[in-house]
Image (cartoon, helix red, strand yellow):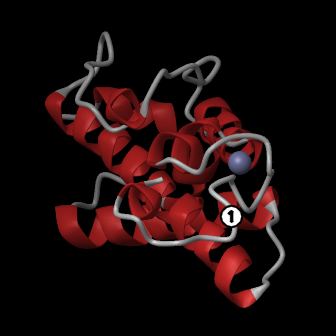
Amino acid sequence: MELDKRDIDLHSVLCPLCDDDLETVDHSIVFCKHAIEIWDRVYKWWNMGSFASFNIHEVLGEESCPGSSAFGEKIWLAVQWISAYIIWKNRNNKVFRGYCWTAPVAFNEIQIKSFEWITSKAKTKKLDWLTWISNPSSFLSVC
Ligand SMILES: [Zn+2]
């Protein structure tokens, strides 16, 4: 939609993944059925209930998690940003390179990359891989 607003002639302004709606940032990262499939997995993994956001700013905002430490909130926010990045990357790989879109593969990439990037950046020994995979919400209360 941003390219169309700038009078760049496009074949279509519909989402190239689902063909159901206009291709906006909100649609591509939040509302596309393919993106929702991944967000649902991430929210379930973190025991955050159902994924229900109205736009990308809500997804990537700094809404606090009740009972979470500042460190825990930063981790959850980082996971959401990394999820948005992986959704965007996989979308581009599908659209521009013809790769298959598979939610399980994208979700596994989110689990791996978020652990690697957060442990690297946070330089902490508070996170371990097995807990990260099986019960990451336990890190929400870590100070
Ligand atoms: Zn779509």
Query: Residue 121: x, y in percent?
Result: 20, 68
Query: Residue 29: x, y in percent?
Result: 53, 48
Q: Please tell me which residue lies in front, 131 or 15.
A: 15
Residue 123 appears in the picture as rendered: no
Query: At 69% across and 76% down in the image, what residue appears?
Result: 95
Q: Give the side of residue 142 with respect to residue 56, left or right.
A: left
Q: Give the side of residue 78 with respect to residue 130, left or right.
A: left
Query: At 39% across and 57% down in the image, what residue appears?
Result: 2
Asked where in the image residue 82 lies, by quadrant, the reply is bottom left
Residue 135 appears in the picture as rendered: yes
The residue that label 1 is drawn on is: 106
Q: Is residue 102 above or below residue 127?
A: below
Which quadrant of the rendered structure holds the C terminus?
top left
Q: Is residue 41 above or below residue 2?
A: above
Query: At 36% across and 26% down in the image, what residue appears?
Result: 58
Q: Give the side of residue 51 with respect to residue 142, left or right.
A: right
Q: Is residue 93 above or below residue 124?
A: below
Q: Please tell me which residue lies in front, 54 or 121.
A: 54
Q: Give the side of residue 126 with respect to residue 52, left or right.
A: left
Asked where in the image residue 130 lies, by quadrant, the reply is bottom right
